[in-house]
Amino acid sequence: MPSPTDAPNPFSDASDISENKKLVLIDGNSLLYRGFFAMRALTTSAGQPTNAVFSFTMMLLTLLTEQKPDVILCAWDAPARTFRHEAFTEYKGTRKATPIELVEQGPLAREMVAAFQIPTVEVPGFEADDAIGTLARRGRDSGYDVLIVTGDLDALQLVEPGVRVMTTVKGVTDTVIYDEAAVWNRYGLRPDQLADYRALKGDTSDNIPGVPGIGEKTAATLLQKYETVENLLRHLDEVTPAKLQASLVGGTDQMTLSKRLAVIVRDVPLEGVDLPGLDADPHAPDWAAVRALFERLEFRTMLKRIPGESPRRPLPALPESGQPLPPVDRGQEPDAGGGRDIEAEDYDPFAVSEEEEASAVSSAPAAPADYREADTPEMLAEMVKAARGAHRIGLRLHAGEGILDSDLLGVTLAVGAGTVFYVPVQVKMPLEATATSEAEAKGKPAAAAPLTATASLFDAPAGEPTTVAARLGGEPVIVAAPLKDLLEDAGIAKVTHEAKSDIAVLARYGVTLRGITFDTELASYLLNAGRRSGFPLSEIAFDYVGRELTVLDKKERKAMEADALLAHEKQEALKEADALLAIQAVQEPRLAADGLLNLLETLELPVAPILAEMELAGLYVEVPVLNRIAREMQAKIDVLETQIFEIAGGEFSIGSTKQLQEILFDKLKLPASKKTKTGYSTGAEVLEELAPDFPIVSLILSHRELTKLKNTYAEAMPALVRPDTHRIHTSLNQTVAATGRLSSSNPNLQNIPVRTEIGREIRRAFTASPGNTLVSADYSQIELRLFAHVSKDPELVAAFSSGEDIHKYTASRIYGVPVDEVTGDMRRASKTVNYAVIYGISEFALGRRLGISMSAAKELKTSYFTRFPGVRRYLDETVAFAKEHGYVQTLFGRRRYIPDINSRVFQFRQAAERAAANMPIQGSSADIMKVAMIRVYEMLRKEKFHAKMLLQVHDELLFETTEDEVRPLADKVYEAMSGAYPLDVALDVEVKTGKSWADVTPVEDLSASLTDISVP
């Protein structure tokens, strides 16, 4: 892309505010194509691909809701050749064949457009662009404000007063709107010059030849001076330098042809296509037809966007036991799929039939809901009696966001289908009533009571009376407080959503929540771990039982009066608790059929209270250490900037992609390997390839890393340290990673580098509180040990069993030398190969990491598979299983669905095969860590240690304890973790201790003190 001219922009920014009616013109082919590559494989239960039409439909809905067009039309490319092909037979000749999965969705997209009652235009001999250009000119002349919606920047030549173009930036919903000023800002050219621009520089996507040797900057410069191709041809003798003039003279024919190919026609004969008059009624879709098509294509999450009452369609019953589920879109983790963003929510995978609907709907209440407020002793007693007599109760807290600061306003209990009680926990009272009632409750004179107060059901011991801050008939109500007993009774089965949060919030009020036997968030995660939109109860309720829960956004909440907002939240809490029992009734048999119920009950649910305690405990942080690190990092950044500017020959913004492009590729003429829409790429992969040969690039990479770490950790973390605890309370997320691993956020402590000096410095700020010390327990090479176990390769198993250095051992086999002759370089290469095999890293990437050719990297992997044939067999069998069943699973039965495993698009399929081979290893590692956490937690309680578990990151557990407990704690933690699961090779645990996280050192001879470790 050329740099804009220094001349002032001749166009003023157009106002979005206009009283004219709006005409929206859609380039159907362009958006459908974009949608196909923006979203991973998505199919109906019958196997019909739908990802492209799903994304396309999202754009239609967005346009209707945000743009509110009065008239909307969609143009399609006709299947026949166009006049451009007649002029140049190779026009678009370099394009690859359209994927069959996309071809199959063309008719569905047209059907969707018809359901939305959007007229279509398709003219043989012309492209959709030409029809759109013609309609845009007609619309503008008729008094409409025109918006063209496309994924193709070629349409920017159509921009003019009254006509704007919306183009997709990423996927189909990330867009930008261009008017004349925006076009000038991007290209330094007027919109009507863009066809000339393409004529000069060519266009590889459409195979428009252009003039050989003319690039983007030269083309823009020529047009800024000569305006058009035609005028340039008349002044060729003026062009300098001579080499450029020669190129233009020799390319005259190509220039003329390219201009004809590039110009969008604006006078296409559109027979029978007339725009409505300005007095016509605004466009209105046939929502009944849209709904029917959504249901047929299983676009259940989109049903909520249909105006009016959405259908309450529950999910179907399970297939018969033992029958595999159909392949579905379960999403991907970032490391597994090539970095493309998914622009839509996942859909539910199960097919719906009338019989299945009838089966599933039985879980919903048949009678109108009975919602009551238990705000009197009599109502509270009635609720407790009903709860104790129920088979299972649904529990939902009415509280604010965040577990540390949210106020608990109420507890909602569903004791049966449609029977729900709301118990107000704390509500501010008028001054006199509050002061009097609280003073009486505490045996003090009223004058001694605070001026404002909030009473709680949990203020008094269980079973004793306390004040409920609510008034009936003007008097404060004194009720018994059996609610605490009810919540702490493990014998009363409870269904929750976000169990960890409920446990943590109630713990702050002195309540130990027990008896959780089912959690709908965790169940949803186990059934659909790759779901990118998360597991909010509102979506889960709709997806599984067709219940609609209202979620207010910040703007809506702010607009409501406090009393109205409180009343709304109460009502929603009642509906949410009621939905929990219905959802559980659908999810539980599904979990059982998939073999996942045991995983929920023995792993995920027991981990939830552990995570709650860890979040409440937090990590002690020395803020002065962080401040010192920030200053030191900034000093290093300043030195790097000086060195970079010296090589560059001047100062520039290193963080600006545009300026970095200009310095590296225009000024310094570094070789550019990858081009994006905004110019040559300055991404990490590109720069890492250049770094060995160009010192400035190496300095820039160091500058990036330091700047990111300073901004993310050294400078940002002090603000996250709570002044009342001097600790950071990171969020430990149980339902994010598709492999089952835990993750952390606010801040993300997993991204602190482990083996770099910078990372160690940041970890040095995490310390034990005064008088205590830290203990770290880390699984050693757990993924490689699991790899040996699942592959059953005798060489790998033998290596671990003998206590060999695994990387030296594999190096000796790969390179064919004795172990004692393995060099440091050989071992490093072997280590890289070991993990490359686990993570499915390509020969190209392996070669780049090792600094060797792709062929040499291929030889290394071939040698590896020859020496360790069990590894090759495992990988092949795992991928074959995924292709047959649509998922892979861990040693514990955790599933991950691999939607692209049978894709006919090579890149999608290759990424899916890598994910399939790796997930059983990563997922089993995560499961073993959770088993270890449960064993350690139970041990801490049994042995009555003072120690607290603080953090789980990667393969490590971090504890804080007293000095005298270090050795006995280390012994017990080692025993619990090393015995977490019986593998063919031993689980090895390294336990360390120290004052800071960075300075922990090994606690010696742990394994020697444990001669007999029992394995459950």
Image (spheres, rainbow, N blue to C red):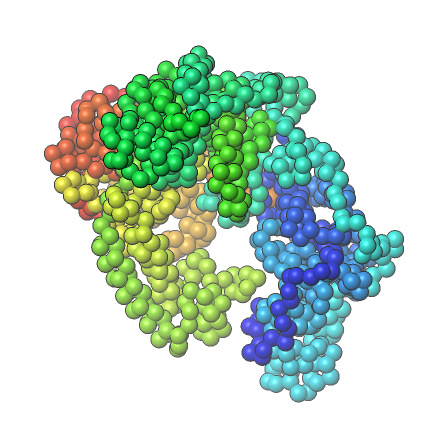
Extreme residue toward the top, this view: 389
State the image coordinates of residue 12 (x, y, percent, origin top left).
63, 72
Query: Is 1003 drawn above or below residue 226 in the view shown?
Result: above
Depth order, front residue of 434/391: 434
- Residue drawn at x 52%, y 23% is 371
Quadrant occupied by the N terminus:
bottom right
Depth order, front residue of 884/893: 893
State the image coordinates of residue 474 (x, y, percent, origin top left).
42, 28
61 relative position to 440: left or right: right
- Residue drawn at x 28%, y 55% is 758
- Residue 866 figure quarter: top left
- Residue drawn at x 80%, y 65% is 141
Depth order, front residue of 132/519: 519
Depth order, front residue of 534/232: 534
State the image coordinates of residue 575 (x, y, percent, origin top left).
53, 28
Extreme residue toward the right, this view: 271
State the image coordinates of residue 360 (x, y, percent, origin top left).
60, 20
